[in-house]
Amino acid sequence: MERTVITNFLEAHGFYRDLDLSALAQSVRNDMIARFLGKKSDQDMICTFIDPSSIEISEKSVIVIDAGGTNFRSSLVTFSKDGSYSVSGFEKTKMPGVEKELSKKEFFDAISANISRFKDTASEICFCFSYAMTITEEKDGVLISFAKEVKAPEVVGCHIGAELKKSLKENGWTKIPEVILLNDTASALLAGSGSKKYSSFIGFILGTGLNAAYLQPANKEYELKKQIVVCESAKFSGFKNSDFDIFLDEKSVKPGSAPFEKLCSGAYVGPLALETLQFAAKEKIFSEEFSDAVLNRKSLTLIEVSGFLENSNPEKCEFSDLFDSDGATDADLKNIFEIFDALVNRMAQLSAVIIAACLVQCEEGKNSSNPVFVSCNGSSFFKSYRVYERTKQYLDEILEKLPQKIYYELSSEEADITRGTAMAAFV
């Protein structure tokens, strides 16, 4: 790689563009295995007790709830025998507990009210619940914590499915559905399942946050049956952070939490890019007038970073206000591009690392006619500058170094979380 002013600047602050991705993928996998062996590990490796291998689609209607962040989505998904499906009654509202604090009863009654239009229409509710929880063998979920926007402290520690069924009964439902809890990564995985072509499945999400799930084969040593395991990849800490990463983490709402996510997810790459630019401005890498503009800027998003990379002409990019001073020289623009490109490229590198660790852990994909299907979701993955194509490139480089070839197929469009969530009704 040609050495430039930016190369020297990045490396001086511990940011290296040439990473040993194979070693990092092995480190991620070692951390995954450690959890199963009862040793200290970062990733939670949440068992779901869901095995999609034997899914057979039949005619059925399923109530689907998708709750995460501040949004609450609900719909009725109806499947035909051939696997086709339709969605009806879709509605998007605010997550209960966002506008005001709710008691446990108020919280579950609000959910009951939100899906009351589907009363007695289905025998299952498949609930994609994207908050920290553990899954029980009954496929219920025990809430560990909400995102900071949701204010319902009495719900923490509750069995979400059992409490919802209780509320439905109290609110006049005579046909109480079974409630199956899963998170969005498991839903993404299930969205790609159902085809006999594939030997195994992975769900990968790079959006506002980062996570992965994979199909863990039965393992006597781990005392596990075959099932989807949700990794909580965001928590992996085995990566040496740059000064920029450390500085951003210290300013975050929860310093020290989700360290891997803060390196590459949509919520953080924009702010990280601004921190990096401001480091460079203070070290006089940019022209004086442009440095002042950079230091006065208050925010930056991944959409803006990616927009600049797609079209580095400041007159056309999405954050041209950064150049209102007209102080950016051609050298400044080239240096910005190089910094942004390095940050976005790392998104692809770390995505490849997580997927590679899951591919090896699946223990499948040994035959080209039965690859592992990697079902992906998240606008940061699909819409950020060259992240999708670079992820595949880096993933191939990692897999080429393995003693046995692994065949896989990476989805080229976002997984349908609604369909994937509904698929849990057939497991």
Image (cartoon, rainbow, N blue to C red):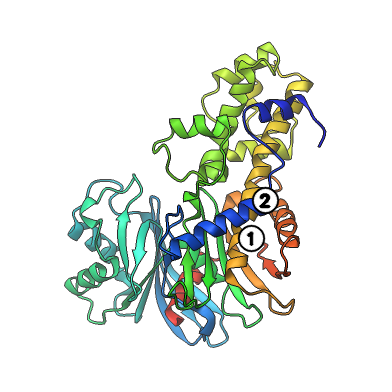
Quadrant of res 364: bottom right
How many numbered marks are there?
Answer: 2
Horizontal side of 33 relative to 181 (left or right) equals right
Horizontal side of 380 relative to 176 (left or right) equals right
Estimate the spatial distance between the alpha carbons at disc 2 and disc 1, rounded to whole Å. Answer: 9 Å
Indicate the secondary structure of the residue bearing disc 1. Answer: helix
Q: Residue furthest top?
A: 288
Crowdedness near tag 1: few (<14), some (14–19) or many (≥20) residues, C-alpha within 10 Å: many
Crowdedness near tag 2: few (<14), some (14–19) or many (≥20) residues, C-alpha within 10 Å: some
| Quadrant of the frame with the N terminus | top right
Q: Badge 1 is on which residue?
A: 356
Nearest to the observer: residue 221 or residue 361? 221
Q: Earlier in the sequence, mark 2 or mark 1?
A: 2
Q: Which mark is residue 21?
A: 2
Horizontal side of 369 relative to 299 (left or right) equals right
Give the percent coordinates (x, y) of residue 355. 61, 60
Q: Residue at x 55, y 22 (%)?
A: 297
Indicate the secondary structure of the residue bearing disc 2. Answer: helix
Give the percent coordinates (x, y) of residue 178. 32, 78
Q: Which mark is residue 237?
A: none
Q: Residue at x 49, y 76 (%)?
A: 219
Label 1 near label 2: C-beta < 8 Å?
Answer: yes
Nearest to the observer: residue 26 or residue 289? 26
